[in-house]
Every structure is written in structure tokens, then in C-alpha cells.
């Protein structure tokens, strides 16, 4: 870093900063104090690079990563004081204030570039920048300091001459800065980044939010909502309101005057949100906000809420189903909605009318003659839903006390496998280590005792409504039968994906019944739903068998990988008694030895496949996971928000063509080295490994020992080649 201020090649700078990030990540665990001191020495120089060099996106990304690392090392889990685990110094505090000032200016610059740019442009700012800004705000916002004078040594151009005095300027701090920026402009490009920052800040540090700031912030966000027909800000306003609702739910010491004012504002927001669920563009955010308000008991609801989940206001979606689960946990399902339901069938109990309507809405189950005419598949078969949420809702609806059943399922033991991929932070373990080794009194043994005491709660106390259970089975069987009739051996693998989703619903319902103690696993295997699931999985196996001859076709490979990923979601290798475990056991009973052997044959064939590594732009590295796909799209569309096309970059004129092409060595474990066939191979291996390790006493149609033996043969010296990226992975 000694001569980095004289470096004019942004490619060279990019590699230097990237190397530092690797260095800090590697040594952070054992050398925290030294890493903090090194950071305090070099960060003023890095600030100088940002302000003076107008770096490109890739370099800014690396710099942001460097800042984030240093903030997390100095302040694990947001710790502010040394007693809480922070590493503080006067020099570090100065860097934080300067970094805050720099980021505020950067966000304003991004907004200005967006306002005057031509063509379509995303109003969102990259999540990494938002996360960094939120972390910095958490550290520098204090109740007693609103204005501060800071020195800016990084703005001085260093030379061999005499040292120049640092520039000084006044900066504003506190939540007033955020409120002013939310109100200061009507332009989405200016408002949206601050909405993102507010949401992130409340999400990560809800208890640091001052109680007195709740009413004014909520009023500002409420005023931004009516502009939903103009601009792109509404999804971000709704997300921000969701975090405010969740934050308020954790506040137990609010003044009564604040509570009354907040309740009035929330009631107005509730009305606006109920109307907005019909807009597909903001449906996800609207349901998220409704769920947060219900969770915090912020408004008084009425029976009209249930019409959303029993009528034609919207179709069942992932966000709608999650909201329904929260509603069913918070309230008892009313007997009826006084909308003529009781006239449909006088012999039925009134308390089952609404439950049946919700059930049919979830499954898009119409009258038989209407189902025959409707060629469109129900949404539950065409898209992914949160694991087992749909099934838990359906089973709870068949119970006389649906609220108790839903609460029972919500307290179900969480499966580690199905929690993976939800915002994994590779550095969070290091932060936890800092905290555990900082305090004199550690709570790790207390936590361990709680985890060891496994609560073997049974649901045998639940009473089932036989009429509703029969209705649910009829709807599921009708949906399955329709799917089987539409399927042919020549159908594409996409059709087989629908079959797996249907299987997941059938065995998910059976598994949830088993978990509540309504019937045993053996009884479930004798049921008509299980037999129908067997028929469906048979055709899935046929599709896999037919695809073995087309492993050189990209479309076929991608579809097969998605199909295997769907199958993997039905498995669970946890040891705790849970609904996930019950469902996994039932799914394993469906698999035939031919199904498993076909997958093993594909693995054997792919071991010797030779093909060109796929470009990152061509390979869908995250499969068809909807959440991850959305995140990937967001990142792509906001990439250019760091560009300043009006300014010529120094590197554009000073770098040679040779330097621009230098990218460094790529790790043999990197995803860029893998082909589409390799990704499929790894996905099948994952599925088979879970199958082999999960099966213990259960009665299944295949031998786990055979799977283990054949998988080990893949690593045999005659086949295994350590030079191949696939084999290393």
C-alpha cells in the first residue's frame, strides 16, 4: 500500500484490494487486533482512492467488501462498546465519520446520475453498499450528537513536499438525516436508496432505533404510499414499512401517546395495503407488510381479511401463503363470512364452510366439471412455495382447532438443510467467536442445554374434522388425476417437475398428519394419497430414464437438474423428530431401485464427459430457485449505478490493452470451471448422498449400502482425476 496513491492502473488496484480482502478474511480469526490496526492504517488511503480516482464498479465492489470486513471485525454483530465486544480507537472513529460522509455523497451522486440519465435504469442501489451504509449509521448515530466537525486527511494529494493540513468540514448525523432525505425529493432515484438504508438498518438493529423516531418515520412512509401509481418506489416503501412493523413489535416500552398515534397511522396503512394486493408488481411486498402488522397486532382486523384467502382477489402465491400461515397462527378461523356460504349446503356445519373455501383457494380446486374444462395447472404445481408451509396450512384447516394446529407446526424443529441458502454470511461465525471470547460470562452452555432438551411434543390432542379431511383428499386426488391424464412418456422434463411438486404436496400432507399423531407412518403408506404419489413418481422415473440419452443437450441438462433439486427438497437428513423428517421418510419409501440406479448410471456417464466450461453468463449457477433468481436479477440491473459515464476513467487512457485483459488465476474449485453437465452431476450426487445417509431402519425399495458402494467407486483411482474441477468439487 506504500505506493498505491501513485498507481494509475485500476486493474492493478483491483487485484491489490482483492488480495487484502483475502488476507483479512484468512487471518481475522486468530489475529483480530493486528487486522484492526492494519485496517486503521490503510483505510485513509483507500478513501483517497475512492474520492480521487473515480474507480470502476469492480474496484468499488472490492473497496466496499474491504470496508464491510473491517466494520465487522471492529464491531462484531454491531457491538458499539468495548464491553460488548467492539474494538475501538480514536483513529477508527475518525475513519467511520469520514466513511459516513463519503457514502452520503456517493448515494446523492448515484441519485443525480439516475435522474439525468437516458433510457431505463433501476432505482435501487446495490445491497453491499446499503449494508455498509446501514452498519456505519448504526455506529455513528447517537442521541447526543447531531452535528460534528471532522478532518479529511484522505483528500490531500500526497507528494514528496511538505505535509498539508487536513481539510475540515461539518457533517450532520442521526435519524434526522434519513428523515430529511426521505422527504427532500420527489424523485425515486433520490428516495429509494434511503428507503433501502432505513429498511436494512431497522432489520439488523431494531433495538437501536429510538422510540421517539417511530411516529415521525411512520408518518413519512405513510405519505410516500399514496404515490404508488407514480414511479417505482412503492415496493421499497412497503419493505421499509414491514421492517418498521417488526421493529415496533419488539418495543415494549412505548409511551401511551405514541401507541395511539401509531395505531391511527397503521390503520390507514392497513387500508391502503389491503387494496394494493391486487397489483401483481407489489403483491409480495404487500403480503409481507400485512403479515408483519398481524404479527405485531398493530391493527384491529375483521372478517374481511379472510376474503383475501377465499375469493378471487388474488391467486395463491408464495407471499400470500406465508401471510395466510401468519393469519392462521394469530386468529381462529371464523365460522363463516356471512356471504351466502351457508346456502351452498345446508347439511354441512357452518364452521367448515370458510375452511373449505380457503382449502379450495389454496389448491385452486374447482367443481369437477370446471376442472375438466380448465387446462391451466394450479399455481401450487407451477412454482415453488416455502417448504411445507402449504401442507401445514392444508392439514391445519382440517383440524377443529386450526389455530392451535398452525401454532404447533410453527414451533416445529427447524431443519438445517432447508434453512441453507437463506442469507448465509460466511463471516458471521467469526463475529460470534469474537463475542464468545470477549465476555467473561459465556452463554454457550446454556444454549447447548436448551438444544439438548429436545421437546418431544406430540399433536395427539388435535381433533380432526372428518368432512374437511375427506374434502382435502378429494381435491388432492382430483389434482393428481388431472396431472396424470395430461402426462405422456414423451412429455418434456418440465412436466415431470410438476409431477414432483404434486408428490411433494401429497406426501407433505401425509407427513404433517403423521407428525400431529392423527395416524402412523404405516397407515400413511396404505392411504390412497400415497398410492397416487407412487404413480406420479413412477412417471418421474421414466422421464429421468428417457433423459439419459440426451445428456449433451443444454436444455435437457438444465431441466433435469431442476427436477433433481425438486426431489432433494423432499428429503431431510436431520435426526430430530419433525414434520420434515416424516415427509422425508415417506418420500424415500416412494423411490424404486430403478429410479436410484438410473441416477447412478447418469453419474457414471458424466464422470467421463468432456466439455467446455460454461461461461458465467450462460450457466444458471443458482438453478431455478425463485428467491435467488430475483437476487441475481437485482444485482445485474443495479451494476451500472456505480458508473459515471460522464467522466473519463484514468485507467481508460493509461492502461494498455494487455493490462486490461489480466484477470488473475482462477481456482479449480471455482464455478466458472464447471460445465452444465458438471452442475447436474453434483446435484445428483447431493441427492444420492442424502438418500444413502438418511435411510436407516425404514422400509425402502433400494439398498443404501449399494448407493454408498457405487458412489465410492466414482472416487476410484482409475476414474478419479484430481486435475479435473468436477472431481475436485
Image (spheres, rainbow, N blue to C red):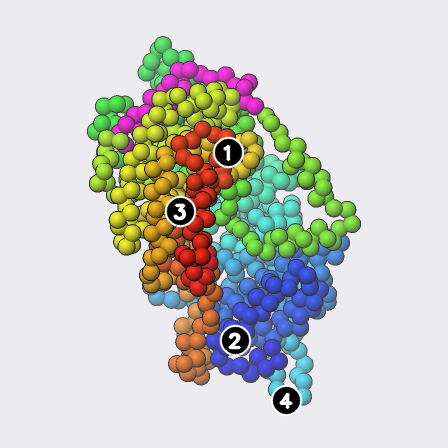
**Residues marked 3 and 2 touching at CB (< 8 Å):** no
**In this orientation, does residue 626 appear?**
no
Please name the residue that numbered disc 4 is placed on. 160
> In 3D space, how far apart are the residues under numbered discs 4 and 3 (Cα atoms)?
61 Å
In the figure, 708 relative to 611: above or below? Answer: above
Please name the residue that numbered disc 2 is placed on. 13
Quarter that holds the N terminus: bottom right
**Residues marked 2 and 1 touching at CB (< 8 Å):** no
Which one is in front in this view, the residue at disc 3 or the one at disc 2?
Answer: 3
Q: Secondary structure at mark 2?
A: helix
Point out the tag, 4 or 1, that comes first from the N-terminus: 4
> In 3D space, how far apart are the residues under numbered discs 4 and 1 (Cα atoms)?
73 Å
The foreground one among 439 and 158 is: 439
Please name the residue that numbered disc 1 is placed on. 696
The residue located at (60%, 27%) in the rendering is 456
Residues in magenta? 458-483
The foreground one among 620 and 69 is: 620
How many other residues sit within 10 Å of disc 2, few (<14), some (14-19) or many (≥20)?
many
Where in the figure is residue 377, as x and y percent of width and height? 28, 35
Point out the tag, 4 or 2, that comes first from the N-terminus: 2
Where in the figure is residue 458, as x and y percent of width and height? 56, 23
Point out the tag, 3 or 2, that comes first from the N-terminus: 2
**Residues marked 1 and 3 touching at CB (< 8 Å):** no
Q: Is residue 615 left or right of residue 410?
A: left
Amino acid at each position: 500500500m506504500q505506493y498505491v496513491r501513485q498507481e494509475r492502473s485500476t486493474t492493478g488496484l483491483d487485484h491489490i484490494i482483492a488480495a487484502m480482502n483475502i488476507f483479512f478474511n484468512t487471518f481475522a480469526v486468530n489475529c483480530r487486533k493486528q487486522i484492526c490496526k492494519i485496517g486503521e492504517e490503510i483505510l485513509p488511503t483507500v478513501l483517497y482512492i475512492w474520492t480521487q480516482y473515480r474507480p470502476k464498479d469492480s474496484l468499488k465492489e472490492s473497496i466496499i467488501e474491504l470496508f464491510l470486513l473491517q466494520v465487522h471485525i471492529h464491531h462484531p454483530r454491531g457491538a458499539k462498546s468495548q464491553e460488548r465486544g467492539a474494538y475501538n480507537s480514536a483513529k477508527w472513529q475518525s475513519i467511520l465519520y469520514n466513511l459516513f460522509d463519503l457514502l452520503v455523497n456517493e448515494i446523492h451522486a448515484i441519485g443525480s446520475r439516475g435522474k439525468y440519465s437516458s433510457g431505463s435504469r433501476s432505482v435501487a442501489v446495490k445491497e453491499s453498499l446499503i449494508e455498509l451504509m446501514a452498519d456505519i449509521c448504526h455506529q455513528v448515530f447517537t442521541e447526543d450528537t447531531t452535528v460534528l466537525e471532522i478532518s479529511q486527511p484522505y483528500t490531500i494529494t500526497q507528494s514528496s513536499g511538505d505535509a498539508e493540513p487536513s481539510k475540515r468540514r461539518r457533517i450532520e448525523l442521526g435519524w434526522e438525516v434519513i428523515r430529511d432525505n426521505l422527504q427532500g425529493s420527489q424523485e425515486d432515484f433520490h428516495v429509494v436508496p434511503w428507503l433501502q438504508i432505513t429498511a436494512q438498518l431497522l432489520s439488523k438493529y431494531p433495538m437501536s432505533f429510538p422510540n421517539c423516531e417511530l411516529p415521525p418515520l411512520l408518518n413519512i412512509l405513510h405519505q410516500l404510499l399514496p404515490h404508488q401509481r407514480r414511479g417505482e418506489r412503492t415496493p421499497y416503501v412497503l419493505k421499509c414499512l414491514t421492517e418498521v412493523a417488526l421493529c415496533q413489535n419488539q418495543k415494549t416500552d412505548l409511551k401511551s401517546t405514541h401507541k395511539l398515534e401509531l395505531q391511527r397511522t397503521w390503520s390507514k396503512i392497513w387500508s391502503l395495503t389491503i387494496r394494493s394486493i391486487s397489483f401483481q408488481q407489489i403483491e409480495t411486498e404487500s403480503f409481507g407488510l400485512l403479515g408483519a402488522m398481524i404479527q405485531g397486532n398493530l391493527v384491529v382486523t375483521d372478517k374481511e381479511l379472510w376474503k383475501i384467502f377465499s375469493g378471487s382477489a388474488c391467486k395463491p402465491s408464495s407471499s400470500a401463503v406465508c401471510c395466510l400461515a401468519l393469519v392462521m397462527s394469530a386468529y381462529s378461523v371464523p365460522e363463516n363470512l356471512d356471504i351466502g356460504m351457508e346456502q351452498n349446503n345446508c347439511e354441512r356445519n357452518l364452521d367448515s364452510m370458510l375452511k373449505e373455501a380457503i382449502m379450495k383457494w389454496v389448491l385452486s380446486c374447482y367443481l369437477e366439471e370446471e376442472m375438466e374444462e380448465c387446462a391451466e395447472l394450479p399455481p401450487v404445481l407451477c412454482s415453488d412455495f416455502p417448504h411445507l408451509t402449504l401442507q401445514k396450512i392444508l392439514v391445519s384447516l382440517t383440524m377443529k382447532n386450526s389455530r392451535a394446529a398452525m401454532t404447533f407446526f410453527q414451533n416445529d424443529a427447524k431443519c438445517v438443510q432447508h434453512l441453507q441458502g437463506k442469507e448465509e454470511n460466511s463471516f458471521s461465525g467469526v463475529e460470534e467467536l469474537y463475542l464468545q471470547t470477549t465476555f467473561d460470562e459465556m452463554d454457550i452452555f446454556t444454549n447447548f442445554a436448551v438444544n439438548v432438551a429436545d421437546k418431544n411434543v406430540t399433536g395427539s390432542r388435535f381433533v380432526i374434522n372428518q368432512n374437511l379431511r375427506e374434502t382435502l383428499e378429494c381435491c388432492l386426488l382430483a389434482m393428481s388425476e388431472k396431472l396424470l391424464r395430461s402426462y405422456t412418456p414423451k412429455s418434456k422434463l418440465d412436466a415431470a417437475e410438476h409431477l414432483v411438486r404434486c408428490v411433494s404436496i401429497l406426501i407433505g400432507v401425509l407427513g404433517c398428519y403423521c407428525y400431529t399423531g392423527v395416524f402412523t407412518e404405516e397407515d400413511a403408506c396404505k392411504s390412497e394419497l400415497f398410492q397416487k404419489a407412487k404413480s406420479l413418481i413412477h412417471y418421474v422415473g421414466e422421464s429421468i430414464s428417457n433423459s439419459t440419452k440426451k445428456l449433451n443437450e443444454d436444455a435437457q441438462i438444465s431441466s433435469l437438474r431442476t427436477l433433481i433439486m425438486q426431489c432433494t427438497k423432499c428429503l431431510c437428513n436431520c435426526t430430530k423428530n419433525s414434520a420434515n423428517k416424516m415427509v422425508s421418510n415417506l418420500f424415500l419409501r416412494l423411490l424404486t431401485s430403478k429410479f436410484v440406479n438410473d441416477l447412478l448410471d447418469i453419474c457414471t456417464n458424466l464422470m467421463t464427459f468432456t466439455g467446455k466450461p460454461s461461461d458465467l453468463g450462460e450457466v444458471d449457477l443458482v438453478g431455478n430457485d425463485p428467491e435467488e433468481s430475483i437476487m441475481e436479477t437485482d444485482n445485474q440491473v443495479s451494476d451500472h449505478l456505480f458508473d459515471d459515464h460522464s467522466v473519463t476513467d484514468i485507467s481508460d487512457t493509461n492502461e494498455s490493452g494487455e493490462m486490461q485483459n489480466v484477470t488473475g488465476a482462477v481456482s479449480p474449485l471455482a464455478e466458472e470451471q464447471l460445465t452444465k453437465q458438471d452442475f447436474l452431476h453434483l446435484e445428483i450426487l447431493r441427492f444420492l448422498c442424502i438418500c444413502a445417509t438418511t435411510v436407516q431402519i425404514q422400509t425402502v425399495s433400494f439398498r443404501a449400502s449399494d448407493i454408498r458402494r457405487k458412489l465410492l467407486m466414482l472416487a476410484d483411482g482409475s476414474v478419479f482425476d484430481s486435475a479435473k474441477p468436477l472431481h475436485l468439487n
